[in-house]
Image (cartoon, grey):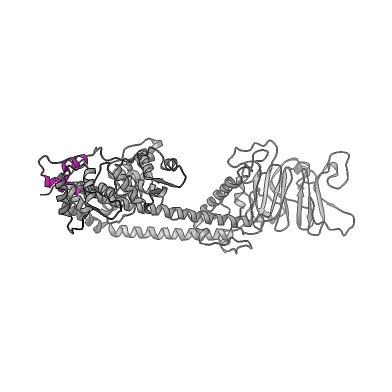
Amino acid sequence: MRFGNILTRRANAGEYNTTDQMVEDPQVLFRRYDVDGSGTISLEEFRLMLPKLGVNLCPAKSLRFFRHYDADNSGTIDYEEFLTLLFACNSNENPAGFVPGARLGPKDGFELFDTDRSGVIEEEEFYYLLQYMDIGADDLTQERMFRKYDKNRNGTIDYGEFKKVWLSLANTRNELQERGIEVPTFATKTQLIFMLDQILDEEEEMEQAAFHFAEIWRKRQSDERRRQEEIRTAEERLCLALDTLGQVYLFGGGIYNQFIDNGDEAHISHASIDSCDINRSNDLDIPSEWLELLQSLWKRRLTDRYHDLNISESTWPVWGRCPQQVALSDGTAFCLYNNNGALRTWGGTATWWDSGVTSTDFQGNDCTGRFYSQEGNITARSRALHMPGSHTIHTDESLEKSVCRYIDDDEPISNDDLKMGLEYYKRWTPAPDDQVRAHYLSLLENIEARRIKQSIELRGKPCHDASKVSMMRLLVEDIRLEKKILGDLGHRKLVEIDMEIATLSRKRKPKLVKRLSLQFAQIWRDTLCEIQKDEMQRKAEAKLEAKEHLLTKINLCLETWSSGEPTYTSVAAGSFHAGVIDASHRLYTWGTCLAGRLGTGTKSNDAVTSDDGRLSKVKGLGRGVVQASFGSSHSAAVNDVGSLYVWGSTAAGKLGLGVFDEECYIAQPRLLRITGSDCQIKRVS
């Protein structure tokens, strides 16, 4: 006679504890009990910790679990082993859905007295074990049972033999009821033993599965720690390479806090040199992962090493890009980098000027484009064909690991996918707008991992080592395919079959379960398997192509990070004006025009009565300009034949033209002759 159809587990069986809510943080609790700082805890400390984490085990079971993870028999377990044990006890984490019972079982007692872990116990230990488990049998009965199951007459019995003794002597009805099993009123002793034996087999099977999944989880955690260590090592190597190529350290926030990242917009009452927003554009057209990595590494370095030096975070875009020259005005910083004169600016006003500068603007006599961070007039295709400069960051596998750390990570499951999966199991309920994800995840916790696993395996997919979230993501993909190919009616039919299979599995009707499973598999095999196989192959190919494309872009950005087309050769800054010399040795200035300091005035002096936020070419400098220097209200430049030109305010004789009785200025460059007609000027300051 079969009794599987009457075995139903009580939903509110108080004997089975859960670990849905951890009372205290495991890491904090572990450190509290690890008083000597050795990184390990003893059995006594372990038993004291478990109730604080919402795990209730009897002493024998806690000892058995502790011994299982004390691999070296040292009498202690470390933090990693402790977390692995907690994972095995958490039904919402391990796919087996195992919840350890607080009641003493035969296996708990057997391993308690099997002190040498030999797998057998002797006759004396057998007697003490029965007493410990409160088995009411006299000495004669105990001796008779031991002799009966000691088949090889060597004075020992193993666990399987002891289990049979325990089943025949224990109060089976009471054991079943305390495990939350509805017991038939008129069931015989033999029938009750059969029922309890099935329950014990199921518990032990789930326990072994939980230990198996916990070990897989431990290995994954170990692999992840090793991966993170490799990433940190690669990032350190990357930082060293970038340091070798140079960086700009900008101290202080500026008089108007214009160098503070993410600060309020600078309110400057006087005219100021404009600068670009460094986060506005990707000037090299390289992957955003690279820029995010670089910015995060620079912020981490400032936090770890220079947290008390007030260094601006905004200079990360020139890290490792061979900075050549830095100039500071009253409220703006300038940097030429990349050995080719690319210009980066910080500070000034928070305004972004329209970038009207084109390649033709630098060819004619009048430049009308507005200033912006000029990276060079080069197309994406030209960048790809451009040979690396003399300073190149050479790639290797570790650097690619650092940059591509996001490539193989699975995307987190979306709220829509969670909702679809919850609706499949009829567990979805509306949530407040500000707590949708937390609500959905809490509902997901109430679905057993083995139930989701069963639904996926019905569709012909193995998921032995998958987490609950990963399995839900796989299931949602199948649900979408079923609705697309079979329609809502066909999908609902599959849902009904799945739910019926789950019900029959709980009632232990394997023949009906097998029949419905074959029916379910037939529907999938006839209409969905090939379609899904093609879609999975396309997704795999697309993912591989995306990965290869990203790796190509990463390699390209590493090669071009310190190279590019020549733009500027020098930069100079005064208090409220600045200028650059381009590759053709032309000087362009912008900023405050007062006192003729820009050198772009005319005889009528109209141009010097207003500020100029545009790049304007300075004329009248003879041949090509090789160096320029700007003061507070005056400027000077040297051309390639050694001639010196000056312009701006003449106060205090600063232009070298003599001292004048009243304040005046020169709006256009004027040649300053030094004694001796053959004298050549090298530099001016």
- Residue 586 lies in what quarter of the image? bottom right
- Residue 146: give x, y in percent of width and height: 17, 52
Residue at coordinates 31% horizontally, 57% vertically from top-left? 532
In this rendering, position of residue 661 left or right of residue 93:
right
Whether residue 332 is visible here, answered yes or no, is yes
Find the residue positioned furthest to the right: 676
Q: Relative to residue 89, is residue 514 depicted above or below? A: below
Residue at coordinates 34% horizontally, 46% vertically from top-left? 93
In this rendering, position of residue 285 left or right of residue 194:
right
- Residue 529: give x, y in percent of width and height: 28, 58
Q: Which residues are magenta?
A: 169-198
Residue at coordinates 66% horizontally, 58% vertically from top-left? 340
Choose between 591 and 160: the one closer to the eye.
160
191 inside magenta stretch: yes
- Residue 54: give x, y in percent of width and height: 34, 39
Q: Main secondary structure of the magenta part?
A: helix
- Residue 571: give x, y in percent of width and height: 71, 51
Whether residue 279 is visible here, answered yes or no, is no
Q: Relative to residue 637, is residue 178 depicted above or below? A: above
Q: How many marks?
A: 0
Choose between 49 and 24: the one closer to the eye.
49
367 inside magenta stretch: no
Choose between 306 and 40: the one closer to the eye.
40
Choose between 332 and 216: the one closer to the eye.
216
